[in-house]
Image (spheres, coloured by chain):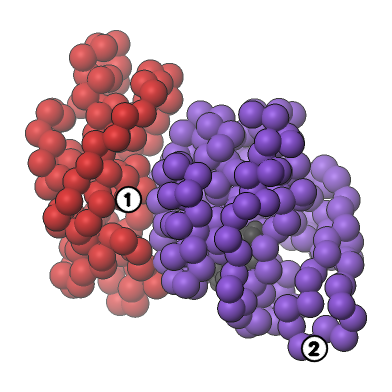
Chain colours: A red, B purple
Amino acid sequence: MRLLTHNMQACNIKGVTNGFPFRVEAEEVMEKQVDFNADFLRNLFPKIEWKALVEASRAMGYHELPDEADSSLLDSDDFLQKFHRALPQLHLEEGAFVCPETGRKFPTALIKCI
Amino acid sequence: MKLKQLEALLGNLQQFSNPKVELEQYPTGPHIASRMLFTAENSFGDVSGKVVADFGCGCGTLGLASALLDAQHVIGVDVDPESLEIASENAEDLEVDIDLLQCDIKNLGWTGQIVDTVVMNPPFGTRRKGADMDFLFVALQVASQAVYSLHKTTTREHIKRSALRDFGACSAEVICELRYDLPQLYKFHKKKEVDIAVDLWRFVPRTN
Ligand SMILES: C[S@@+](CC[C@H](N)C(=O)[O-])C[C@H]1O[C@@H](n2cnc3c(N)ncnc32)[C@H](O)[C@@H]1O
């Protein structure tokens, strides 16, 4: 399970009104090599919930992302490299997504959001 | 990747071991699946480098085909955990990464405009009326670039009208007409194989 999916998925079990973002409980995290694609990241940046990404990546032990980010950073190669490591490269292999409202846990082997 | 290579890889995937009739579980064969994704990529540039979602992914055929054609990020969604398990084994065999979510399409609730392209072979709606329309409605809400889908040719006018008038699509085109061999998975099918006419659609959502 990767953080891009985390960034779009709200917990939508019945009755939950504010199910975004899931808190992440990480047991096993893996970083996998993916080809760097700067255009993809620049394109994606305005659509991302930055704060949710930062918190989830920190919960996975990755602390390189700044608290705040705006589009001026997209000219910085250093920033793009860090963004790249968090987004396509970090994998939550074992762990859970936790609903921010009810505390209900969903194991990430299969995130269930019925 | 060449079309033939893609078709051969898809032909090796594991498919539903105990298909569930009520969920209309039958796989998209390698012939149709490879052409569907190949067209999406080579004629329209909707796959490589994109965020692709596979709705009702079953054992993952369409999502895995997208990953093989270099989609940047693939998410498969299905309500059935058993087929997701198979999809995850298929991904491992092919050495590609896809994220899998167990969810009823009607309850998806994705935020933002992150998904570029949705690919799907939804239930035709023969078991639960309107299932095909639920899929199309949600797909047109989450995709920002294109939706590829298979629907029975007999429903062509209805699909076109619903997509353009009710679901806000700005275009709805049948790209090609196919023969779909539904294997005899289900007892209520009397013949050995049921050959039905199916349209491959490309929809463009309103946001474009
Ligand atoms: C015709 S099969 C296609 C399977 C796969 N995409 C393929 O092309 O081989 C339809 C799939 O939709 C799933 N499905 C049916 N109703 C669903 C729903 N309401 N939400 C999510 N998935 C559903 C079924 O479990 C099944 O895997």
Rendered image: mark on residue A87: none
Q: Foreground: B194 or B95?
A: B95
Query: Identity of the amino acid at label 1?
Result: Met
Disc 2: CA contacts within 10 A as few (<14), some (14-19) or many (>=20)? few
Q: Position of residue B142 (x, y in %)?
A: 52, 50
Disc 2 and disc 1 on one polypeptide chain? no
Q: Residue at x 41, y 60 (%)?
A: B101
Picture residue at 45% right of the left edge, 42% below the top: B95
Residue B68, horizontal then vertical, whole percent: 56, 37
Circle 1: element type: loop
Disc 1 designates what residue? A1
Q: Secondary structure at mark 2?
A: loop
Closer-to-camera residue (B46/B19): B19
| Location of residue A11 by image quarter | bottom left
At which x and y percent is residue B24?
Answer: 66, 74
Residue B20 to residue B97: above or below: below
- Where residue B188 is drawn, which disc sits there? 2
**The image quarter in which residue B134 lies:** bottom right
Image region (quadrant) for ligand 1: bottom right
Figure check: A16 above or below B69: below
Determine whether, in the image, residue B44 is placed left or right of residue A55.
right
Discs 2, 1 touching: Cβ within 8 Å: no
Q: Closer to the camera, A9 or A3?
A: A3
Q: Is B172 in front, or is A2?
A: A2
Q: Residue B61 in the image: x percent, y percent?
A: 60, 53
Check the image and name the residue furthest to the bottom.
Answer: B188
Evaluate whether residue B198 shows in this view.
yes
Q: Amino acid at mark 2?
A: Phe
Calculate the distance from the C-alpha at mark 2 to the C-alpha at mark 1.
Answer: 39 Å
